[in-house]
């Protein structure tokens, strides 16, 4: 039987040799056998070294990773990276352009949804496909939290503590629960699936911290599950809406069944129809699997003097957030007295937001009003909310959740 | 904005021109604009024509498709095909060998699970991955039938008629309900995921016709869904078990939620962990999407003088069916009198098959006994069934369903 290294050599068409490994601390104890003479603290020298043919960047963050990747591409050395922050930045857009201009691979399967072969599926299998929409659970932490809240009846803080105890959430959970992590992945997916240059700051972003048990109960009554979604949607020939927010998906939708910290991305294409890719979105081994897949690709392409296909690049024309249309589920804490309902519904009507379903529930110090709208413009809904906030009878505006997965 | 043809040209790195289209009837009315001078009835001449660089075979069946594909490969012309019957035959194994020897692409994403980018994911993204098991709902017709039986309480014949009325099942449904279609796909997947040369006749195959409403009710009580699965499982370093049969999967398993005529393939890898790819497994447009993806690949590789990676080929060592281990759910119609249970359990015990759960249900003319075993050898279970069949108190042996998705 062949060893794994020999199999890899056959798969790559070339024997791989590690030129060097740049680390920040030479003395740190490492598991496994890492020959000391491969280690260096001078990452730039390693990238520039003539014997280095391919660069794998697993540092993360903006610098020095950005500088190293740029140098590698300038020297026409293919780069495999898992660096979502870098790729989703404006600099990431420039690096992709540079890679294309240099005719060299910049591969980043591990940057979105771990081992799920998502980037490759979009870049290669679906390259002839006109994609309408991509909806993804791309952050496992927030899926875990919302799943615990739905299935165990936990409140947000308890679910977050559990996620931290299980190692699904960082001690500082901001990047996950405020949607920054998902926004970076949405920006990368917009590029891969639609060929648009989008960076994180372009993505409309809403965290999951406003979601309460009451919202979840109401959603469940209506037949919906609450999921942390990144939505990238074609809104015209050259226009796109890219956003990240807690969303309601109908329980019959495949995304509704994605539990725990799993990731899944649902793709709607003109010819391919509905596709979903599901798997572990994080963790050392799944990410390593994606990196190795890319590395084999990079070696094969490099040997053949070719590169992986990349989406045709278009200037990004993003739909203003106010123009996005969806159905909404709105939760309001109101005074418990006659006339409140009339006052509230008048505000909705004044802004052309039509109410589809409504429920009033008891509450300690007042009442809670839960409403589902027909399809409405985000701008109109926001104007409605602003005016509601000024109403004396409205004590607090709770979660505003978009229903996703159905068509207007 | 670019036309789709122009986009395709950019994606391929070359402008595609249709050299000719071989048809069986020149006069047949065709939808869309098909220039008459492209049509020919001489497929072999078209394949051999010097101006033909790449061949797309969408005839299906063994001959003349096999001869045409062989000729193309002998002339070093890449072939894109959706022909699962051919690929899963012994001739298919030879054709794959021929393609490798000739250094020319033989691409067949459309042959398994329609537009789901499964073949590419296994061949490219997971090429560095040690895969433990692949479990797939690869036949939409049988998934639809079992789903209707589970959710609507239909009996088998009603569900089959509905599937036929909806166009999910052929007028002669044998290939689907007897598992021939799934067995061909299992053989192809064994090659792509594990590098084993397996042909349809090597696959253990059981249809879904023996499944009754009672079996489904019992399974549901135990928390299982019934699914038509193809299972390809590593049983040793160089050994594989390849089989197709109705299976019980726990309702928390992602495969349990795959409804209607959708396909899904669940992959368990050493590093990648659990992955699932979901989508439409059949239909003209999804299949066309897969063919176009492959075609773009073929053109790109052909221009670069390279080929798509293929799994390392190993001689197939298939685990004899009698050695497969699983948990079983067995349904027996028995006489309704004392001592039956003792007689039946003695037979199980005599063959080392340990019973985990048991239920007795009323029945028109006797009683029905439903049993779940612990992990047991298929050979032992079959011996048990044979002896049960000889027992005077056992009137009929109903479904024997394997529980899949858990580990021993």
Image: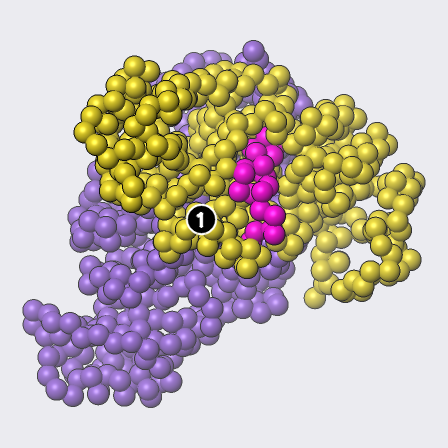
Chain colours: A yellow, B purple
* Any part of residue B203 in sight: no
Q: At 42% from the left edge and 30% from the top edge, which residue is drawn?
A: B285
Magenta residues span: A168-189
| Rendered view: B402 above or below B349 | above
The rendered magenta stretch, by its main secondary structure, is classed as: helix
Pointer 1 indicates a residue of which chain? A
Q: Quadrant of residue B252?
A: bottom left
Q: Is residue B208 left or right of residue B263?
A: left
Q: Quadrant of residue B314?
A: bottom right
| Residue A328 position within the rendered picture, expressed as x and y whole percent measured from the top left | 35, 29
Is residue A186 on the magenta stretch? yes
Q: Quadrant of residue A272?
A: top left
| Residue A114 position within the rendered picture, expressed as x and y whole percent measured from the top left | 60, 47
Which quadrant does the C terminus of chain A fall into?
top left
Please give the residue where the numbered disc 1 appears in the rendered image: A156
Q: At 29% from the left edge and 66% from the top edge, which residue is drawn?
A: B222
| Residue B321 position within the rendered picture, expressed as x and y whole percent measured from the top left | 44, 70
- Mark 1 Cα-neighbour bin, 10 Å: few <14, some 14–19, many ≥20: some
């Amino acid at each position: 039987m062949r060893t794994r290294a020999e199999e890899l050599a056959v798969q790559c068409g070339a024997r791989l040799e590690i030129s060097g490994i740049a680390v920040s601390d030479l003395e740190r104890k490492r598991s496994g056998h890492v020959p000391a003479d491969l280690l260096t603290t001078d990452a730039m020298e390693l990238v520039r070294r003539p014997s280095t043919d391919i660069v794998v960047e697993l540092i993360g963050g903006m610098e020095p990773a950005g500088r190293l990747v740029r140098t590698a591409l300038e020297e026409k050395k293919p780069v495999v990276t898992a660096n979502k922050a870098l790729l989703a930045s404006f600099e990431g857009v420039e690096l992709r352009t540079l890679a294309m201009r240099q005719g060299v691979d910049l591969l980043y399967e591990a940057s979105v949804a771990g081992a799920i072969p998502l980037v490759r599926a979009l870049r290669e299998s679906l390259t002839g496909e006109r994609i309408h929409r991509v909806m993804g659970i791309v952050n496992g932490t927030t899926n875990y939290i919302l799943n615990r809240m739905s299935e165990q009846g936990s409140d947000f803080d308890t679910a977050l503590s559990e996620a931290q105890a299980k190692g699904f959430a960082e001690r500082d959970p901001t990047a996950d629960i405020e949607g920054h992590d998902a926004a970076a992945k949405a920006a990368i997916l917009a590029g891969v699936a639609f060929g648009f240059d989008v960076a994180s700051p372009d993505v409309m972003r809403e965290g999951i911290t406003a979601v309460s048990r009451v919202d979840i109960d109401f959603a469940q009554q209506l037949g919906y599950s609450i999921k942390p979604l990144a939505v990238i949607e074609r809104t015209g020939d050259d226009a796109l809406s890219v956003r990240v927010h807690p969303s309601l998906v109908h329980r019959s939708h495949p995304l509704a069944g994605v539990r725990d910290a799993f990731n899944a991305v649902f793709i709607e294409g003109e010819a391919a129809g509905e596709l979903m890719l599901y798997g572990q979105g994080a963790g050392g081994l799944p990410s390593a699997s994606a990196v190795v897949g890319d590395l084999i690709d990079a070696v094969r392409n490099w040997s053949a003097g070719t590169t992986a296909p990349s989406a045709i690049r278009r200037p990004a024309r993003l739909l203003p957030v106010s123009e996005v249309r969806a159905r909404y589920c709105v939760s309001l804490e109101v005074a418990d007295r006659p006339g409140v309902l009339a006052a509230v519904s008048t505000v909705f009507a004044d802004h052309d937001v039509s109410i589809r379903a409504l429920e009033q529930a008891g509450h300690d110090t007042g009442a809670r009003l839960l409403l589902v709208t027909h399809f409405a413009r985000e701008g109109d809904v926001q104007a409605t909310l602003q005016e509601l906030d000024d109403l004396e009878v409205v004590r607090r505006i709770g979660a505003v959740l978009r229903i996703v997965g159905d068509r207007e």
